[in-house]
Image (tube, rainbow, N blue to C red):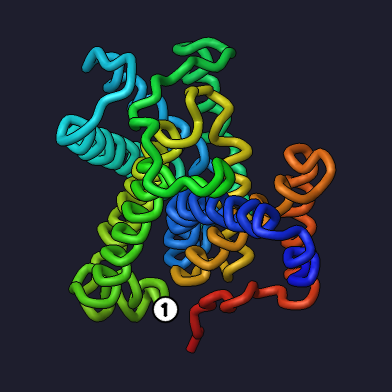
């Protein structure tokens, strides 16, 4: 909204604007986590892993199974909440990481030297397989998920701008994971192997890098990020689990990766937050914004690709000798 319009609307209008931005930041943090999985895989083997959104969906299913097994049906607090959240993040990240590695080993690795269309079609096929298995297991309907977070707000200004514990959890966890991933890629031997493989797989192999292990590690990290994002999404914003969750969410995360620059880790983070903020502002200020927000998000993507086809930060395209 234009600055003069905000001023004319008064304090209430400004608080509404802040609330829309807060909603956008929290949603964007989750989009960024999942978008990182897309961009990591593309940066290494230039594959758009369309099954990634459904790996995220399975993370929500694992989260629901654990909450059910723990017998939690209502709000919890204190160290119990911290412990449960830590357990959920670790379990979902491990499960989704292993699932992603399994998909790579069975569906993508045999097609690594095939025409580029083959692994893309395989990714779509894997996506449908994961969705159908979840639908057979859980049924076609949405299953309610209990609210874990206390309703006490950290900031509450006139019931208009409200910051809750769940908002802090989303943003802090996402930022910590993003920082840890950045340090891993830039500061560890395995991270250097990933960057070398992305730059020139043949040269990296000649220098002693195990390409298969490096690619498997990339899928493991991407799946783990999807699992962490699934926990945040399920316990903080969704209120349900559903076999089709990964479709639209995966598209949003992929859009975020493309918007920032597919293959660029920082671009995925930037794109995630941009998508979230655009969505939040659209819902707040457009007539029937909850319906039009998706059209606005993809409209922004089209405009960006028209004027900057590689995204805001530019795709990291390997230099070929």
- Which x, y percent locates residue 188? 19, 73
- In the displayed structure, 113 sits above or below 287; it is below
The answer to whether one can see residue 104 in this image is: no
Closer to the camera, 52 or 72?
72
In the image, what residue occupies the spot 42% across and 46% down? 167
Q: Which residue is mark 1?
A: 199
Closer to the camera, 277 or 319?
277
Please count the marks in the image: 1
- In the displayed structure, 243 sits above or below 10; it is above
Q: For numbered disc 1, what is the local secondary structure?
A: helix
The answer to whether one can see residue 253 in this image is: yes
Closer to the camera, 162 or 198?
162
Find residue 290 and report its image quarter.
top right
For the N terminus, the image quarter is bottom right
In the image, what residue occupies the spot 41% across and 43% down? 164
- Which x, y percent locates residue 42? 49, 62
């Amino acid at each position: 909204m234009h600055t003069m319009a905000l001023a004319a609307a008064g304090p209430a209008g400004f608080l509404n604007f802040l609330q829309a931005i807060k909603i956008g930041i929290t949603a964007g943090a989750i989009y960024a986590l999942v978008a990182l999985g897309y961009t990591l895989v593309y940066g290494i083997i230039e594959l758009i892993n369309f099954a990634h959104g459904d790996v995220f969906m399975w993370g929500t299913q694992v989260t629901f199974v654990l909450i059910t097994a723990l017998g939690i049906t209502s709000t919890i607090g204190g160290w119990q909440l911290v412990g449960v959240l830590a357990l959920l993040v670790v379990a979902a990240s491990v499960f989704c990481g292993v699932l992603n590695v399994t998909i790579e080993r069975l569906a993508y690795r045999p097609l690594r030297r095939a025409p580029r269309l083959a692994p893309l079609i395989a990714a779509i096929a894997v996506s449908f397989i994961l969705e159908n298995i979840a639908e057979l297991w859980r049924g076609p309907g949405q299953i309610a998920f209990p609210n874990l977070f206390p309703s006490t707000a950290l900031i509450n200004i006139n019931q208009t701008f409200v910051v809750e514990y769940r908002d802090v959890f989303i943003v802090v966890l996402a930022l910590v994971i993003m920082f840890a991933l950045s340090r891993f890629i830039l500061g560890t031997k395995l991270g250097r192997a990933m960057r070398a493989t992305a730059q020139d797989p043949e040269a990296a192999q000649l220098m002693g890098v195990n390409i298969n292990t490096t690619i498997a590690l990339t899928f493991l990290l991407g799946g783990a990020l999807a699992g962490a994002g699934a926990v945040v999404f399920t316990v903080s914003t969704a209120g349900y689990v559903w076999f089709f969750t990964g479709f639209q969410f995966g598209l949003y995360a992929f859009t975020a990766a493309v918007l920032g620059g597919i293959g660029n880790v920082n671009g995925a983070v930037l794109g995630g937050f941009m998508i979230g903020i655009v969505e939040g502002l659209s819902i707040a200020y457009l007539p029937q914004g909850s319906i039009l927000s998706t059209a606005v998000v993809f409209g922004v993507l089209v405009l960006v690709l028209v004027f900057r086809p590689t995204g805001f930060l530019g795709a990291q395209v390997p230099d070929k000798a």
